[in-house]
Image (tube, rainbow, N blue to C red):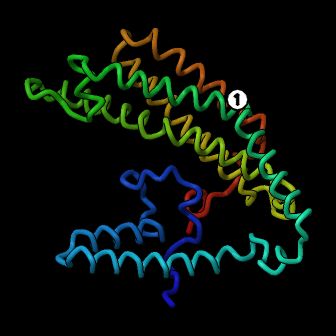
Amino acid sequence: MKQFDPHHIPGIYNWCDRWCEHCKMTSKCYLYAQEQEDKAIMESDLDHDEKMEKIKEKLTETMEMLSEAAEEFEMDEEDMEELDEEEQDEMMHDHQISQIKIDIHPLSDLSEIYMKECMDWVESKGKDTLLGYLVQSKIPEEICDQNEIEKLKKVISHLESVQWNQTMIPAKCRGALNYFSDKSFWDDYPIEERAYNGTAKVALICIQNSINAWQGILFWSKDEEELILPLLDKLIQIKQMLEEEFPNAYKFIRPGFDENC
């Protein structure tokens, strides 16, 4: 069976914002390598059936490797079989209750509201004379002044950051809450290795990047202040909630990102 590349950092992709185009650690990432292999297969001269067969083979290998790597975090099938029907029902019930609690948690609620309002703002700018171009990462052809072009490139960078992180924030908030619902499992791990702290830390990074981006957009155009300030306020509230819920999040050491690997 195919083995993990020793140059890859195990699990590095669990603690990033998945924005590979902006990442300096792609050479250390197993997931990125797999995606590049998939891309190469799809762009090859193989016919459709051959491409699908190659992808299927790779997926099978990947699932086997990940399954072996994750064994220490999962309950063995034999352990599950030893549980009687009542115990299995109780486990399922506890899981369902846990998911309901996550669904109604203020972090989930507010981060989802932020995402929707952020998407609405971006969509509302689609027909704007200039912003309509910038939200699509384009600069109008009629703008020729190089200084102005450089300023607009910075604005585009801010807009791209806002749009990328708008979905990452609620996803990572829910992910942190999901890990935390099984808090007792992680009590055996040091604080800097507990998954809920790591996921919360990624969420906090995405939030801070979004705050910086919105501030950059406001610096360029005060006309958007009335709409952007409420979004910034929500981001600050989400950040404060995360820091209160996960006070040790910043202590988490993300392999490859927060240490020399």
Q: Nearer the viewer, residue 226 or 117?
A: 117
Image check: 167 left or right of 40? right
Residue that extends furthest to the bottom in the rendered view of this protein: 1
Q: Is residue 127 above or below residue 12?
A: above
Task: Give the structural element (helix, strand or loop) at label 1.
Answer: helix
Residue occupying image coordinates x 77% and y 78%? 77
Residue occupying image coordinates x 64% and y 27%? 110
Q: In which quadrant of the rendered image does the C terminus lie? A: bottom right
Residue occupying image coordinates x 41% and y 55%? 20
Amino acid type shown at disc 1? Gln
- Name the quadrant containing residue 51: bottom left
Q: Nearer the viewer, residue 27 or 49?
A: 49
Residue occupying image coordinates x 20% and y 78%? 46
Task: Name the residue carrying label 1.
Answer: 240
Q: Nearer the viewer, residue 127 or 51?
A: 51
Q: Nearer the viewer, residue 56 or 166?
A: 56
Q: Is residue 236 above or below residue 175?
A: above
**Rendered location of residue 41, percent (x, y):** 28, 74
**Rendered location of residue 67, percent (x, y):** 62, 77
**Rendered location of residue 11, percent (x, y):** 59, 66
Count every numbered label the image shows and give the total. 1
Residue that extends furthest to the front in the rendered view of this protein: 85
Image check: 87 left or right of 12? right
Crowd rating for badge 1 (residues with CA inside 10 Å; few <14, some 14–19, many 20+)? some
Q: Is residue 138 above or below residue 187?
A: above
**Rendered location of residue 187, percent (x, y):** 86, 59
